[in-house]
Amino acid sequence: MKFLLTCSAWLEAILKKEIEKQWWIITQTKDRLVFFEWPIELMAKLNLWSRVWNKLYLVLNSKKNIDNFDKLYDLVYEIDWKKYINRYYRVVTKATSIKSKLTSTPALQSITKKAIVDKMTSKSWNKMPEEDSKPIFEVLSFLIEDETFILLNTSWETLYKRWYKTDTWEAPIKESLAAALIILSNWKFDTPFYDIFCWSGTIAIEAALFAKNIAPGLFRYFAFEDWNLLPENYFFNLRKEAKEKIFKKNYNIIASDIDQEVLTKAIQNAKNAKVEDSIKFELKDFKDYKTEKLSWTLISNPPYWLRLKEDNIKNMYENIDFILQKNKDLSGWIITSYTEFNQIIKQKNYKNRKLYNWNELAYFYLKK
Ligand SMILES: C[S@@+](CC[C@H](N)C(=O)[O-])C[C@H]1O[C@@H](n2cnc3c(N)ncnc32)[C@H](O)[C@@H]1O
């Protein structure tokens, strides 16, 4: 089967390394997209274990020079849809067009849907079951420079959504980005790890999930679970195996924040993630770390605007620089969109790497 895995900007290198490490054969890469081939069973394994990626698609058909709607219709119609679509479920079509002649998203979606419906011949399959039922079959027509890919979303919701967030408020950092930062930091799991501005606890929780070898998708739902493409019980057994692979050890992860309200939510998130025994949460002003000796790894996402006045922020970042520089045994990393940090620090003391946090440009600094 051909697969397409998507990721956030600037994370492609990590994605490619992971894929090559597993010997899956990369057939094509484009901005934030990696195409590769492997038997269909990989769909289950990848969704279950993906920490950094966004969505996994099956590539059902593709062709260059799709520059009119008739060509798009034919491309979709060619697919043997009955192999994939259970007639009692809802089909949702989506479209993305980048630097292509066909640009109208609604038109792309409706042509795709029409071709699927025509191919299925029987009309009854397309009856909506219940209004709020999950879009079990999400078909994406993806056009890039007129090359068109007809994709089936195997993940359902994006993979950065794990299962442990208590309410709908979004953390300022995605779970997948937090996991990528941990990979980049090379943290050795049995050494101390700090997040001194923890808010939702995402960075600390992802660190604990890594350390305990908990599959990030263990307790969530995936679209492919409702299809008949895998051998019976295949995914059930995979989940069971994943549960058996969880390490029982506890770890030395410290997460602190100055705000009691957010800390309460972070603790609840850690409980939901079943890692509360590995994280020590503390109500603490980060400045208290000025007098403490920190060693091994720190990854934090300090505020960079908030309700603070400009001069307070500057002062905050000077103190962060102080803490990082003072602790020689610490591999200290911060991710921030506060670009003025560059003027505060001595350039020779840091390396940095460009990333996107949601849609915002950010830098990930490592104290040398
Ligand atoms: C950008 S948020 C961190 C987001 C976190 N990485 C997440 O994804 O949920 C910054 C956090 O710094 C905390 N904060 C602000 N001033 C602080 C201080 N002086 N000491 C410790 N934490 C502070 C805020 O309460 C806020 O929760």
Image (tube, helix red, strand yellow):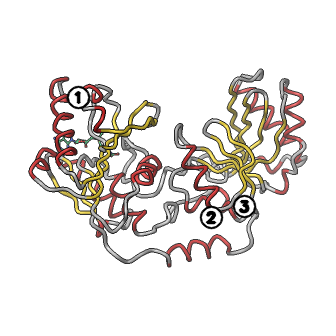
Q: Looking at the picture, how far across and down is residue 65, in whole percent? A: 84, 28
Q: Amino acid at mark 2?
A: Lys
Dot label at residue 227: 3
Q: Mark 2 vs mark 3: which is more N-terminal?
A: 2
Dot in front, 1 or 2:
1
Please give left or right for residue 283 compared with residue 165 in the image. left
Q: Which residue is mark 1?
A: 344
First along the sequence among labels 1 and 3: 3
Looking at the rendering, the quadrant in which ligand 1 lies is top left
Side (left or right) of 94 relative to 277: right
Residue 90 appears anywhere in the view: no
State the mark number for residue 45: 2
Q: Is residue 188 visible?
A: yes
Q: Quadrant of the C terminus?
A: top left
- Image position, residue 160 (x, y; %): 50, 50
Q: Amino acid at mark 1?
A: Ile
Q: Amino acid at mark 3?
A: Trp
- At mark 2, the secondary structure is helix
- Give percent across and percent down for residue 143: 74, 31
The residue depicted at 53 percent of the width and 40 percent of the height is: 8
Element under label 3? loop
Q: Quadrant of residue 338?
A: top left
Question: What is the secondary structure assignment of the residue under circle 1?
Answer: helix
The image's mark for residue 49 is none
Mark pair 1, 2: CA separation: 45 Å
Work out whether mark 1 precedes mark 2 in sequence or the reverse, and give the earlier one.
2
